[in-house]
Image (cartoon, helix red, strand yellow):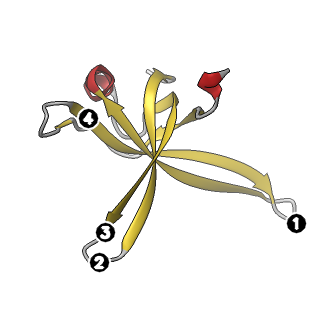
Amino acid sequence: MNMLVNSVQLIGRLGADAEIKTTTQGAKVVNVRFATNEYSKNSKGDWLEITYWHNLVFWGKLADKLEKNNKKGTRLMIQGSLSYREYTDVHDIKREVVDIRVQQFLVLNP
């Protein structure tokens, strides 16, 4: 049951090509935006599509696997956990960001 405390599963599409970067300690990492969609009807009965954007982080072998065959628009199912971080932007404003640390993923389209 402990594994379900901080667990996220999403199906969506990559918002950009995956590009590996290497940290100063030599670890491989990919940061990429991920789009998910929600559909609902408005008061007139018309369908509306809402797109939500998420920050995904892939480490090590998962970063290698993602970069090899996955481009912008690739449909994935991901499983991971939430990670919170803070930073100060160029205008000296403190920002908070929520990332999803991906622990596994499955490509849903060829």
Mark-to-mark CA distance, 3 and 4: 21 Å
In the rendering, at what x and y percent does residue 80 appear? 50, 31
In the rendering, at what x and y percent does residue 103 appear? 44, 25
Mark-to-mark CA distance, 3 and 1: 41 Å
Does dot 4 land on a helix, a strand or a loop? Answer: strand
Residue identifier under label 4: 29
Mark toward the start of the polypeptide (4 vs 1): 4
Residue at 31% over, 68% down: 88
Quadrant, the C terminus: top left
Residue at 46% over, 22% down: 104
Residue identifier under label 1: 43
Residue identifier under label 2: 92
The type of residue carrying mark 1 is: Ser
Residue closer to the observer: 26 or 52: 26
Does dot 3 land on a helix, a strand or a loop? Answer: strand
Mark toward the start of the polypeptide (4 vs 2): 4
The type of residue carrying mark 3 is: Thr
Mark toward the start of the polypeptide (3 vs 1): 1
Left or right of 44 on screen, residue 80: left
Residue identifier under label 3: 88
Q: Are marks 3 and 2 in contact (CB under 8 Å)?
A: yes
Mark-to-mark CA distance, 3 and 2: 6 Å
